[in-house]
Amino acid sequence: MKEDMKDICLTIFRAGLAAVDPREAVKRSLRLKGDDLWVGKRSYRLKDFKRIVVVGAGKGSAPMAQAVEEVLGEWLEGGLVIVKYGYTAPLDKVKLIEAGHPIPDEAGLQGARKLLETVKELGEDDLVFCLISGGGSALLPAPVAGVSLTEKQKTTKILLESGATIHEINAIRKHLSRIKGGWLAKAAAPATVVSLVLSDVIGDDLDVIASGPTVGDGSTFADCISVIEKYELDSQMPSAVKKHLRKGVEGSADETPKPDDPIFRKGFNLIVGSNIQCLEAAARKAEELGYKTLILSSYIEGETREVAKVHGAILKEIIRAGRPLAPPACILSGGETTVTIRGKGKGGRNQEFVLACGMEIAGWEGAAVFSAGTDGTDGPTDAAGAFADWRVAERAREIGLDPGAALRENDSYTFFERLGDLIITGPTNTNVMDVRILIAV
């Protein structure tokens, strides 16, 4: 029974992934008729442009670029995209650079420099496609003057371990960058900028996805200081970072371009894939497999362990009372939770979610939980997530594992590795946050 439930969850998850394949998502959004290119419901006459190039960054940017090459053909001159190591696709005209994620590295620094040079060469009669997907923030490190890559790396690590939301993390990233927070659009002006976006954030906020390189930024330097104070990070932050943020609050450092800036008038942004699309496809597959299915929400965020308790409670209610669905039931949810690191173990938010939820459903026969990142990675691990059923605590004790201790040490990876219940997909070349699957039979 357990192995069947794990396989069922994987089948449902893969159906969701297929729906947000970046290459297919872009091809669905572009339609070429003669020299007229339709991007969603907006059209561009390609012969009106002298040059057409592609730039981009993110885990899905290589297959996105592949799709643009296929649609535009000879109209496309070339370009450059930056991807996480291993997240590649065969490209003809567009150059590919692999770089570090989630902590930026030297390859990303050089790639961001080349990308900026590419768009700064464009003129009023040029068109640039900007292909943005999750991971773009880390893959586009272009620190402001006075802040080094090492200091940017340290800041990113501190923020990722603080429990801050992606909105809060990206507010700071934008204010330490020469490319994020609308600065890429400013560098490309006066060219026409068309951004195709694969969303990996709650609510599909364009100014948060990859830290919004081509859209106006609604956050401020003051917001950045508030984040540091909220999570008590002042003593940990590099002095150069704090100095720059203080200069911004005082008005002696340039604020990010805001939404009403004229540079955005020639821009167009289209979301081509999102978490809800993934969940809807997963739900259709679950229904095909005979499950009564409900999408709980694509907006789930908050502390992972608390979110896990709520999901565990829903499974118990299904089994005990048949609410909100009677078994066989499948509940789906999406979004992205946060983990506040307290221990010295290894894991990620999906693995920690499954461990915490698995403890909640221990002994509730017929209950199972699955959670995985759609990008194929979960935290600093090679796993996308994990699976557990009602026997997880019992099985753990049989081989000398303590679920509570693993949770206290944030050591979910070791726990599920020993149980054989890690979900390892390898690079998926997409990223639309996480998918959680609850099964009750």
Image (tube, rainbow, N blue to C red):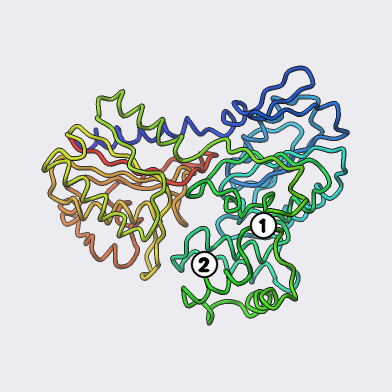
Would you call the spot at circle 2 few (<14 residues within 10 Å), some (14-19), or many (20 or more)? many
Residue pointed to by mark 1: 181
Q: In the displayed structure, does residue 53 sit left or right of residue 284?
A: right
Q: Nearer the viewer, residue 58 or 26?
A: 26
Q: Residue at x 53, y 32 (%)?
A: 21
The kind of residue on which mark 1 rests is Gly
Local secondary structure at mark 1: loop
Label drawn at residue 330: none
Q: Which residue is drawn at 12% across and 49% down?
A: 363
Image position, residue 417 (x, y; %): 33, 51
Above-or-below relation of 435 to 210: above
Image quarter (top left, top right, bottom left or bottom right) of the N terminus: top left
CA gap between label 1 and label 2 equals 18 Å
Q: In the displayed structure, does residue 119 sit left or right of residue 422?
A: right
Q: Which residue is drawn at 31% across and 59% down?
A: 305
Mark with earlier residue (1, 2): 2
Q: Which residue is drawn at 19% across and 42% down?
A: 367
Image position, residue 144 (x, y; %): 73, 67
Q: Furthest residue to the front?
A: 260
Q: Quadrant of residue 309?
A: bottom left
Label drawn at residue 159: 2
Local secondary structure at mark 2: helix
Image quarter (top left, top right, bottom left or bottom right) of the C terminus: top left
Image position, residue 369 (x, y; %): 27, 44
Image position, residue 317 (x, y; %): 16, 45
The kind of residue on which mark 2 rests is Leu
Contact? badges 1 and 2 (CB < 8 Å): no
